[in-house]
Image: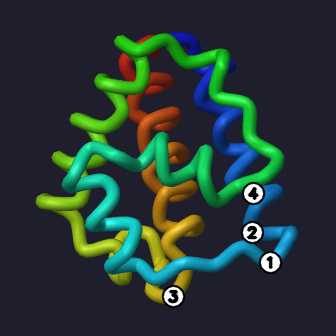
Amino acid sequence: MHLTSLTVLAFYLNGAVDAGKQTGIDEMYDQIEAGTVFEYLKRNVERIDLSMLTVADRNELVEEWQRIANAVDARRKFVVENNGYCLLLAYVIQGIQQRAEMKE
């Protein structure tokens, strides 16, 4: 997966937060756990284009986010405790960081 695809996704999530979009942390955890997070985003974020992500990319991200959700305390590590979109943005940034470190 290209880092550009992840940064574009981050921009869309940032724009959603800027537009006042909010959802609870638990709601976003539920969507990640169920594997329905991309469907949720399409339904709830008006200005989002996910065409840069293939089905394989989406599956990879869902699995990655499920691992992070099960292993990381978001309040402590990502300083996120209120908005599920901010949580997802933190996961995307974490993924960018991990991929960038692998390239070094």
Where does label 3 land, which residue? Answer: 82
Q: Are marks 2 and 1 in contact (CB under 8 Å)?
A: yes
N-term-proximal mark, 4 vs 3: 4
Kindly identify the residue that appears in the image at 30 percent across and 53 percent down.
32
Q: Is label 1 in a helix, a strand or a loop?
A: loop
Query: Left or right of 43: which side holds 94?
Result: left
N-term-proximal mark, 1 vs 4: 4
Query: Left or right of 19: which side holds 50?
Result: left
Dividing the picture into quarters, in which one does residue 22 lie? bottom right
Marks 4/2: CA–CA distance = 5 Å
Q: Are marks 4 and 3 in contact (CB under 8 Å)?
A: no
Identify which amino acid the numbered label 3 is placed on: Asn
Q: Is label 2 in a helix, a strand or a loop?
A: helix
Q: Are marks 4 and 2 in contact (CB under 8 Å)?
A: yes
Kindly identify the residue that appears in the image at 40 percent across and 78 percent down.
25
Identify which amino acid the numbered label 4 is placed on: Asn
Q: Position of residue 30 (x, y in %)?
A: 27, 66
Where does label 1 land, which residue? Answer: 20
Q: Position of residue 94 (x, y in %)?
A: 44, 46
Marks 1/4: CA–CA distance = 10 Å
Identify which amino acid the numbered label 2 is placed on: Val
Identify which amino acid the numbered label 1 is placed on: Gly
Where does label 4 land, which residue? Answer: 14
Identify the disc placed on residue 17: 2
Query: Left or right of 92: which side holds 59?
Result: left
Q: Position of residue 7 (x, y in %)?
A: 68, 32
Marks 2/1: CA–CA distance = 5 Å
Marks 3/1: CA–CA distance = 13 Å
Q: Is label 3 in a helix, a strand or a loop?
A: loop
Dividing the picture into quarters, in which one does residue 8 lie? top right
